[in-house]
Image (tube, rainbow, N blue to C red):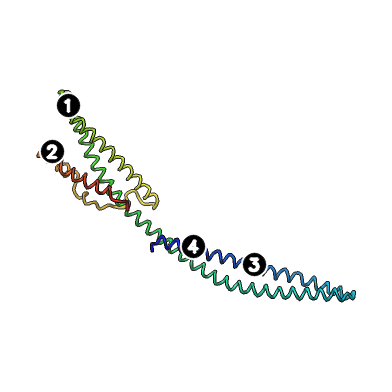
């Protein structure tokens, strides 16, 4: 049974208990008002009995006495019911109070769980965002280099369709990476705003950060010198890992 299911079920139980409590409060109030009404009428009837007796209206006096007797019986019945409902109300009040405490505890557990899940998601998005930024920087640098090369080739009338196609592929890849990065930035902003986290929260232990950017650049330069006509294996492997990570479902 998940925590969210427990919270939902508990809320239903609490709502039912609160409704029962409200019904008992209404019943107690109704019977107390009945008692008050009877008590307010009896003195007036007793005065009417005295006046009827003084005028020797014995039948009237007898009828008024019967009415007082019926009112007193109704009063006693209402008092008994009011006491009975009050006992039930006391029990229901304690029950509602306990359920409200449990509801507050469950709400806190749910909030803590949601906060932990959001923090984990923020770490995931932050890590991938940083990787995308590094990759975009490398792609932009290659674009600039390629643009310079194309300009030189155009001046020398050596531009080829292959270079143009490669440039379009890299431009499209940059566009897709920038869109993904923008999505990550937006999600990180929403998660931090939701929990009032600082802009540098949480610190991300990214294994790829242990290698300075300068070393990565040096490796790329070495690969370019060794294999000028073939794609860089490091970039292909990183692109494949990035695609696999993006295909994973959001946690």
Using a 10 Å C-alpha cutoff, classify the residue at mark 2 as few (fewer than 14 neighbours), some (14 to 19) or many (20 or more).
Answer: few
Quadrant housing the N terminus:
bottom left
Query: Which of the two discs, 4 and 2, labels the residue nearer the N terminus?
Result: 4
Most distant residue in the right direction? 55
Locate residue 176 relative to residue 33 in the image: left or right: left
Q: Are marks 4 and 1 in contact (CB under 8 Å)?
A: no
- Please give the residue where the numbered disc 4 appears in the rendered image: 12
Q: Is residue 18 above or below residue 57?
A: above
Locate residue 76 relative to residue 218 in the image: left or right: right
Residue 115 image point, x, y percent: 37, 56
SS state under label 3: helix
Which of label 3 and label 2 is nearer to you? 2
Q: Residue at x 37, y 59 (%)?
A: 113
SS state under label 1: loop
- Please give the residue where the numbered disc 1 appears in the rendered image: 159
Which of label 4 and label 1 is nearer to you? 4
- Please give the residue where the numbered disc 2 appears in the rendered image: 230
Using a 10 Å C-alpha cutoff, classify the residue at mark 4 as few (fewer than 14 neighbours), some (14 to 19) or many (20 or more).
Answer: few
- Please give the residue where the numbered disc 3 appears in the rendered image: 29
SS state under label 2: loop
Locate residue 236 relative to residue 114 in the image: left or right: left
């Amino acid at each position: 049974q998940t925590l969210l299911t427990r919270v939902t079920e508990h809320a239903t139980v609490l709502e039912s208990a609160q409704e029962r409590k409200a019904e008992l409060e209404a019943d107690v109030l109704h019977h107390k008002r009945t008692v008050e009404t009877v008590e307010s009428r009896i003195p007036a009837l007793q005065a009417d009995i005295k006046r009827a007796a003084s005028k020797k209206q014995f039948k009237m006096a007898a009828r008024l006495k019967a009415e007082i007797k019926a009112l007193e019986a109704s009063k006693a019945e209402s008092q008994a019911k009011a006491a009975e409902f009050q006992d039930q109300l006391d029990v229901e009040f304690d029950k509602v109070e306990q359920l409200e405490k449990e509801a507050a505890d469950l709400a806190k557990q749910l909030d803590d769980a949601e906060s932990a899940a959001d923090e984990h998601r923020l770490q995931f998005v932050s890590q991938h965002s940083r990787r995308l930024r590094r990759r975009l920087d490398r792609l932009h640098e290659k674009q600039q280099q390629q643009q310079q090369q194309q300009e030189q080739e155009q001046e020398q009338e050596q531009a080829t369709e292959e270079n143009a196609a490669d440039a379009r592929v890299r431009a499209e890849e940059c566009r897709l990476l920038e869109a993904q990065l923008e999505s990550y930035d937006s999600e990180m902003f929403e998660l931090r705003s939701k929990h009032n986290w600082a802009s540098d929260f949480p610190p991300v232990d990214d294994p790829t950060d242990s290698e300075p950017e300068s070393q990565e650049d040096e490796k790329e330069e070495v690969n370019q010198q060794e294999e000028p006509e073939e794609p860089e294996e490091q970039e292909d492997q990183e692109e494949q890992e990035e695609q696999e990570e993006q295909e994973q479902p959001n946690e």
